[in-house]
Amino acid sequence: MTAAAAQRRIIDRLRIQDFRFVEIESKRRVVPEEMADLRAFILSRKRVKHAKAGFFFDQFLDTPDNSLFRKGASLRLRYKRDGTAVYLQYKGPGFHRGGVLYRSEFRSERLTSLLQEESHHDIIRFNQTSVAGILAQHRGTPIEQAMRSHLGEATLRRITVGPIISMYQKDKFVVDLGHVFLEPSLDRVYAFRIGRGGVHPLSTFCEYENEVKAKRGFEDEKLDYIEDLLEFDSRLARSFDMPHEPLDKYHRCASFFLRKSEGRRP
């Protein structure tokens, strides 16, 4: 199969139009006590450079009946720079093949009408701006087109809740392979559920991600470097306890919450 044919099969399966928006990544769980040693080991690998460390948080959005969760999609408001830079990020339903997750990924331009609200309880509220309203301001953009195609108008109008917040400490690295590069990262995630009584701790976990990324104009070459990603991960897994993680952050956090809430139903 040619590279062009392989790309076409992937974007057709993901129901998008442009291979530039295909995310190719691996995910593994990490034992919290091994994070420091794993970080040092990654930095000892050839061609690895530390890119940056950051702290930010996401508010995951859904419908009251969790339609996005059930479709395998995720939608989040990402707050950076102490909440002054906010973006809408959407990841469509994906599929696993050969230890790698393929899914679509989109990000809006910076949102100027939505900021973190200061409140007595420091609760992030999502009650003044709707997702439908945000998309109306981004009509014709890739994120708007993908969300309408994957979710439909009725679902978009019902995205009115944001019950889960995740805070991240992220260490990001770069493995230079020429036009293409690997981007391993280590995440320490603190997840909270917003309930009627305020914010409640939901889960804390550590995670390793690795993504095949390309410099602008060379996105078509990403498929050629999947074996490099797998080999890099395999070397780490031979030295550390790093089982594969099939769920993204939203589904990992929400599945715990939904299991608990559904278990209480009569």
Image (spheres, rainbow, N blue to C red):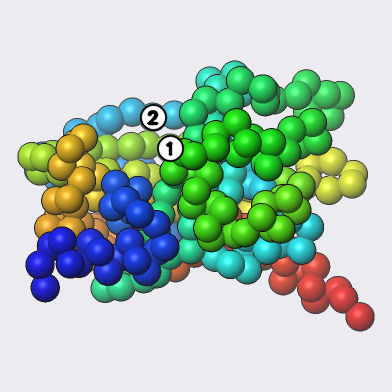
Q: Is residue 144 left or right of residue 218?
A: right
On-image quarter of the C terminus = bottom right
Q: How many numbered dots are placed on residues in this image?
A: 2
The residue that label 1 is drawn on is 170
In this orientation, which residue lies closer to the viewer: 86 or 228?
A: 86
On-image quarter of the N terminus = bottom left
Place residue 262 in its image quadrant.
bottom right
Picture layout, residue 141 above or below residue 164: above
**Residue at coordinates 53% horizontally, 60% vertically from top-left?**
150
Q: Is residue 216 left or right of residue 191?
A: left
In this orientation, which residue lies closer to the viewer: 160 or 266?
A: 160
Q: Mark 2 or mark 1: which comes first in sequence?
A: 2
Place residue 257 in its image quadrant.
bottom right
What secondary structure is found at the residue carrying circle 2? strand
Picture layout, residue 262 above or below residue 211: below
Q: Amino acid at mark 1?
A: Lys
**Residue 243 shows up from this direction:** no
Disc 2/disc 1 C-alpha distance (Å): 6 Å
Place residue 16 in its image quadrant.
bottom left
On the image, the x and y values in percent for residue 165 come to 66, 43
**Residue at coordinates 67% horizontally, 25% vertically from top-left?**
114
The residue that label 2 is drawn on is 53
- Residues tagged 2 and 1 counted as in contact (Cβ below 8 A): yes
Picture layout, residue 114 above or below residue 266: above
Residue reaching furthest to the bottom: 266
Residue reaching furthest to the front: 140
**Residue at coordinates 35% horizontally, 54% vertically from top-left?**
17
On the image, the x and y values in percent for residue 99 come to 30, 70
